[in-house]
Image (cartoon, rainbow, N blue to C red):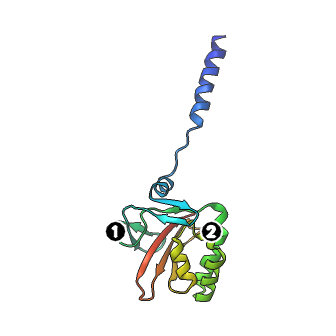
Amino acid sequence: MKKVLFTLSIAAMLVGCSKETISPTTVDAKQQLSELSGDGFQLKSGTWRSFYDNGGNDFGCASPALNCIPFDIVVVGLHEPIFEDVMSAIASNNATKVSQEFSDNRNVLKDYFDISEIDEVIDSNLTVTSRGSIAGNKVCFKFIDSTSAIKTIYPLTF
């Protein structure tokens, strides 16, 4: 009987422990630094970073502060096909295609990018470039203004 009670006690402790989940740092940072409202993604605060590119798959955002948002955004798996279409339009170097993809997918993209920047891409006031691939699990989207200055960089993890 003691073995049964001991086994049940251990099983109860294990079940209680299995309910705990640890969120990735990027998700915690997103929850702390942004909020999703009816208007989508809105950056609240945080230490901005700079984009770096050392070739190959060695690129991303790090200190010092400049134009990279303070955290990496994790893309929900079912949104990957939308980002594949957006990246295909960007790779075509056709501003009309890029604008159309952003317009067609505005309701999804607003959860990852600032809505005002999405609208500026749709209106052709900003251009967008991307670095990386979904297959490589990392893409940085650069939003560039009419003077060729980088406005914002969004690092996304797939």
Closest to the observer, 158 or 56 = 158
Q: What distance separates the C-alpha of mark 1 from that of mark 2?
A: 28 Å
What residue is drawn where x is 34% and y is 68%?
Answer: 65
Q: Position of residue 46 (x, y in %)?
A: 38, 61
Helix, strand or loop at mark 1: loop
- Marks 1 & 2, CB-CB < 8 Å contact: no
Left or right, residue 46 beside residue 2: left
Screen quadrant of the N terminus: top right
- Disc 1 marks which residue? 65
Residue 12 in view: yes
Labels 1, 2: front one? 2
Residue 108 circle label: 2
Closest to the observer, 125 or 79 = 125
What residue is drawn where x is 63% and y is 26%?
Answer: 11
Left or right, residue 147 beside residue 107: left
* Above or below for 114 versus 36: below
Quarter holding residue 82: bottom right
Residue 94 in view: no
What residue is drawn where x is 65% and y is 76%?
Answer: 85
Q: Position of residue 41 (x, y in %)?
A: 53, 65
Quarter holding residue 75: bottom right
Helix, strand or loop at mark 2: helix
What residue is drawn where x is 59% and y is 70%?
Answer: 109
Local crowd size for mark 2, using a 10 Å CA cut-off: few (<14), some (14–19), many (≥20): some
Local crowd size for mark 1, using a 10 Å CA cut-off: few (<14), some (14–19), many (≥20): some
Q: Name the outermost residue toward the front.
A: 38
Residue 46 circle label: none
Identify residue type, mark 1: Ala
Identify residue type, mark 2: Val
Q: Position of residue 90 (x, y in %)?
A: 58, 82
In primary-sequence order, the first of circles 1 and 2 is: 1
